[in-house]
Amino acid sequence: CEVLLGTAPLGPVEEVISAPANDVLQVARDGAPVLVPFTADAVVELDVPGRRIVVRPDLFGPDGP
C-alpha cells in the first residue's frame, strides 16, 4: 500500500510491525524509514482495493517526518 500524509505521498509500506499496543507501519523513505502507528487516531482513510492509506497531515507536527 502507498501511504499518504494528507494529500502528500509519504511512501510505500515496507513492513507491518506487531507491537503490544498497536501495529506500526514501516514506510520506506529516502534515508531512514518512517514508523506510522496503525490506529484509528492516525489513519483517516483505508482504501484496501486502491492500496492506499491516508494518515492525518499533522501526524508528525509542522515539520513533517
Image (cartoon, rainbow, N blue to C red):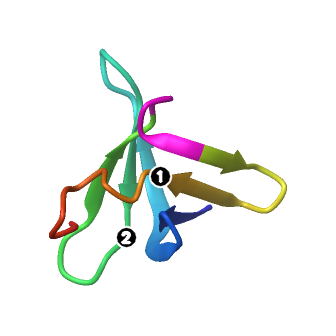
Asked whether 54 or 14 is in front, the reply is: 54
**Disc ID at residue 1:** none
Residue farthest along the right direction in this orientation: 49
Seen at 37% across and 70% down, the residue is 28
Instruction: Work out whether 49 lies above or below 10.
Output: above
Question: In this figure, what is the number of numbered marks?
Answer: 2
Apparent side of residue 5 relative to residue 64 in the rendered image (left or right): right
Instruction: Work out whether 18 lies above or below 57.
Output: above
Q: Give the magenta range.
A: 39-44
Mark 2 packing: few (<14 Cα in 10 Å), some, or many (20+)?
A: some
Q: Earlier in the sequence, mark 1 or mark 2?
A: 2
Seen at 48% across and 76% down, the residue is 9
Label 1 sits on residue: 55
| Residue 32 lies in quadrant | bottom left
Q: Position of residue 26 (x, y in %)?
A: 36, 54
Q: Position of residue 11 (x, y in %)?
A: 45, 73
Residue farthest along the bottom direction in this orientation: 30
Mark 1 or 2, closer to the camera = 1
- Please tell me whether mark 1 sits on a helix, a strand or a loop: strand
Q: Position of residue 6 (x, y in %)?
A: 48, 64
Label 2 sits on residue: 28
Amino acid carrying label 1: it is Val
Instruction: Work out whether 35 lies above or below 21.
Output: below
Seen at 56% across and 44% down, the residue is 44
Q: CA distance from mark 1 to mark 2?
A: 15 Å
Asked whether residue 43 is drawn in magenta, I would say yes
Q: Position of residue 54 (x, y in %)?
A: 56, 56
Mark 1 packing: few (<14 Cα in 10 Å), some, or many (20+)?
A: many
Seen at 45% across and 36% down, the residue is 38
